[in-house]
Amino acid sequence: MDVKFADLPNLAGQEIGVSDWLLIDQDRVNKFADATGDHQWIHVDVERAKAVPFLGGTIAHGYLTLSLIPYLSADLFEVIGRTHGLNYGTDKVRFLTMVPVGRRVRLRQKLLSAEQKSGGWLLRNEMTIELEGSEKPACVAEVLTLVFGA
Protein backbone atom coordinates (compact mmCIF):
# COMPACT_ATOMS: atom_id res chain seq x y z
CA MET A 1 0.00 0.00 0.00
CA ASP A 2 1.34 3.43 -0.94
CA VAL A 3 0.19 6.52 0.95
CA LYS A 4 1.32 10.12 0.89
CA PHE A 5 3.03 11.39 4.03
CA ALA A 6 0.35 14.05 4.65
CA ASP A 7 -2.45 11.48 4.28
CA LEU A 8 -1.31 9.14 7.07
CA PRO A 9 -4.02 10.21 9.55
CA ASN A 10 -6.68 9.21 7.00
CA LEU A 11 -5.62 5.56 7.37
CA ALA A 12 -6.19 5.41 11.13
CA GLY A 13 -8.36 2.45 12.02
CA GLN A 14 -7.68 0.62 8.75
CA GLU A 15 -5.94 -2.64 8.02
CA ILE A 16 -2.73 -1.91 6.11
CA GLY A 17 -2.16 -5.42 4.83
CA VAL A 18 -1.14 -9.01 5.40
CA SER A 19 2.32 -10.38 4.67
CA ASP A 20 3.28 -13.61 2.95
CA TRP A 21 3.77 -16.70 5.10
CA LEU A 22 7.24 -17.34 6.53
CA LEU A 23 8.47 -20.78 7.60
CA ILE A 24 10.07 -20.89 11.03
CA ASP A 25 12.82 -23.49 10.72
CA GLN A 26 15.32 -24.80 13.23
CA ASP A 27 18.21 -22.98 11.57
CA ARG A 28 16.50 -19.60 12.16
CA VAL A 29 15.80 -20.53 15.80
CA ASN A 30 19.39 -21.68 16.36
CA LYS A 31 20.80 -18.47 14.85
CA PHE A 32 18.52 -16.40 17.08
CA ALA A 33 19.69 -18.42 20.10
CA ASP A 34 23.31 -17.74 19.13
CA ALA A 35 22.65 -14.02 18.59
CA THR A 36 20.90 -13.58 21.95
CA GLY A 37 22.63 -16.19 24.08
CA ASP A 38 19.25 -17.77 24.85
CA HIS A 39 19.94 -21.48 24.33
CA GLN A 40 17.06 -22.77 26.46
CA TRP A 41 16.46 -26.40 25.48
CA ILE A 42 12.83 -25.86 24.40
CA HIS A 43 14.26 -23.86 21.48
CA VAL A 44 17.42 -25.74 20.51
CA ASP A 45 17.32 -29.35 21.80
CA VAL A 46 15.12 -31.08 19.22
CA GLU A 47 15.17 -34.57 20.77
CA ARG A 48 14.47 -33.37 24.30
CA ALA A 49 11.63 -31.11 23.11
CA LYS A 50 10.08 -33.97 21.08
CA ALA A 51 9.84 -36.02 24.29
CA VAL A 52 7.62 -33.40 25.96
CA PRO A 53 3.98 -34.13 25.00
CA PHE A 54 2.69 -30.54 25.06
CA LEU A 55 5.65 -29.38 22.94
CA GLY A 56 6.16 -32.20 20.44
CA GLY A 57 9.32 -30.45 19.25
CA THR A 58 11.21 -27.21 19.57
CA ILE A 59 9.48 -23.83 19.59
CA ALA A 60 10.58 -20.39 18.46
CA HIS A 61 11.61 -17.82 21.05
CA GLY A 62 8.87 -15.29 21.76
CA TYR A 63 11.33 -12.51 21.04
CA LEU A 64 12.24 -14.13 17.72
CA THR A 65 8.58 -13.97 16.78
CA LEU A 66 8.42 -10.31 17.84
CA SER A 67 11.64 -9.48 15.99
CA LEU A 68 10.10 -10.64 12.69
CA ILE A 69 7.76 -7.65 12.60
CA PRO A 70 10.10 -5.33 10.64
CA TYR A 71 10.89 -8.05 8.10
CA LEU A 72 7.28 -9.14 7.61
CA SER A 73 5.96 -5.56 7.38
CA ALA A 74 8.62 -4.25 4.98
CA ASP A 75 6.52 -4.67 1.83
CA LEU A 76 3.10 -3.80 3.28
CA PHE A 77 3.33 -0.04 3.62
CA GLU A 78 5.22 2.64 1.67
CA VAL A 79 4.98 6.28 2.74
CA ILE A 80 5.50 8.51 -0.28
CA GLY A 81 7.49 11.60 0.72
CA ARG A 82 8.98 9.97 3.80
CA THR A 83 12.57 11.00 4.42
CA HIS A 84 13.26 8.69 7.35
CA GLY A 85 11.69 6.83 10.23
CA LEU A 86 12.62 5.82 13.76
CA ASN A 87 11.61 2.91 15.93
CA TYR A 88 9.83 4.67 18.80
CA GLY A 89 9.03 1.59 20.88
CA THR A 90 6.52 -1.16 21.46
CA ASP A 91 3.49 -1.29 23.74
CA LYS A 92 1.28 -4.12 24.97
CA VAL A 93 3.29 -7.08 23.68
CA ARG A 94 1.55 -10.40 24.24
CA PHE A 95 2.67 -13.92 23.25
CA LEU A 96 -0.59 -15.85 22.95
CA THR A 97 0.50 -19.20 21.56
CA MET A 98 3.75 -21.05 20.93
CA VAL A 99 5.29 -21.16 17.45
CA PRO A 100 6.44 -24.72 16.78
CA VAL A 101 9.48 -25.08 14.55
CA GLY A 102 8.33 -26.17 11.10
CA ARG A 103 5.21 -23.99 11.12
CA ARG A 104 4.55 -20.77 9.23
CA VAL A 105 3.70 -17.28 10.47
CA ARG A 106 2.54 -14.09 8.81
CA LEU A 107 1.87 -10.52 9.88
CA ARG A 108 -1.42 -8.62 9.84
CA GLN A 109 -0.92 -4.85 10.26
CA LYS A 110 -3.52 -2.28 11.28
CA LEU A 111 -2.79 1.43 11.70
CA LEU A 112 -4.44 2.48 14.95
CA SER A 113 -3.45 6.13 14.90
CA ALA A 114 -1.21 8.79 13.38
CA GLU A 115 -0.48 11.74 15.64
CA GLN A 116 1.74 14.75 14.95
CA LYS A 117 4.95 14.62 16.97
CA SER A 118 8.35 16.33 16.66
CA GLY A 119 7.62 17.50 13.13
CA GLY A 120 6.55 14.06 11.92
CA TRP A 121 3.86 11.47 12.50
CA LEU A 122 3.87 9.03 15.38
CA LEU A 123 2.29 5.88 13.97
CA ARG A 124 0.74 3.34 16.32
CA ASN A 125 0.29 0.02 14.53
CA GLU A 126 -1.33 -3.13 15.82
CA MET A 127 0.93 -5.95 14.62
CA THR A 128 -0.54 -9.43 14.81
CA ILE A 129 1.69 -12.41 14.07
CA GLU A 130 -0.63 -15.18 12.95
CA LEU A 131 0.27 -18.86 13.18
CA GLU A 132 -0.93 -20.93 10.25
CA GLY A 133 -3.67 -23.34 11.34
CA SER A 134 -4.22 -21.66 14.71
CA GLU A 135 -7.18 -19.61 15.84
CA LYS A 136 -4.94 -17.80 18.34
CA PRO A 137 -2.26 -15.44 17.09
CA ALA A 138 1.30 -16.10 18.18
CA CYS A 139 1.95 -12.48 19.12
CA VAL A 140 0.11 -9.16 19.24
CA ALA A 141 1.99 -5.91 19.77
CA GLU A 142 1.43 -2.20 19.34
CA VAL A 143 4.46 -0.88 17.50
CA LEU A 144 5.31 2.83 17.49
CA THR A 145 7.17 4.42 14.60
CA LEU A 146 8.05 8.08 14.16
CA VAL A 147 8.17 9.03 10.46
CA PHE A 148 9.34 12.27 8.89
CA GLY A 149 8.67 13.77 5.48
CA ALA A 150 10.06 16.44 3.25
Image (cartoon, rainbow, N blue to C red):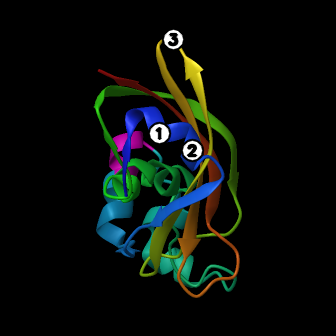
Residue 3 locus on image (x, y percent): 38, 47
Determine which quarter of the picture holds residue 116.
Answer: top right
**In this view, the mark in front (2 or 3):** 2
Residue 36 sits inside the magenta stretch: yes
Position of residue 36 measured from the top left corner of the image (x, y, whole percent): 41, 41
Q: Which residue is mark 1?
A: 7
Task: Give neighbour class at mark 2: few <14, some 14-19, many 20+ (Cα, 10 Å).
Answer: few
Residue at mark 1 to residue at mark 3: CA–CA distance = 17 Å
Badge 2 or badge 3: first in the primary sequence: 2
Which residue position is annotated with label 2? Answer: 10
* Numbered mark located on residue 118 in the image: 3
In space, the residues marked 2 and 1 are separated at their CA atoms by 6 Å
Which image quarter holds the N terminus? Answer: bottom left
Q: Amino acid at mark 2?
A: Asn
Question: Does the magenta-highlighted stretch encompass residue 117?
Answer: no
Amino acid marked by disc 1? Asp
Residue stretch in magenta: 32-37
Seen at 29% across and 20% down, the residue is 150
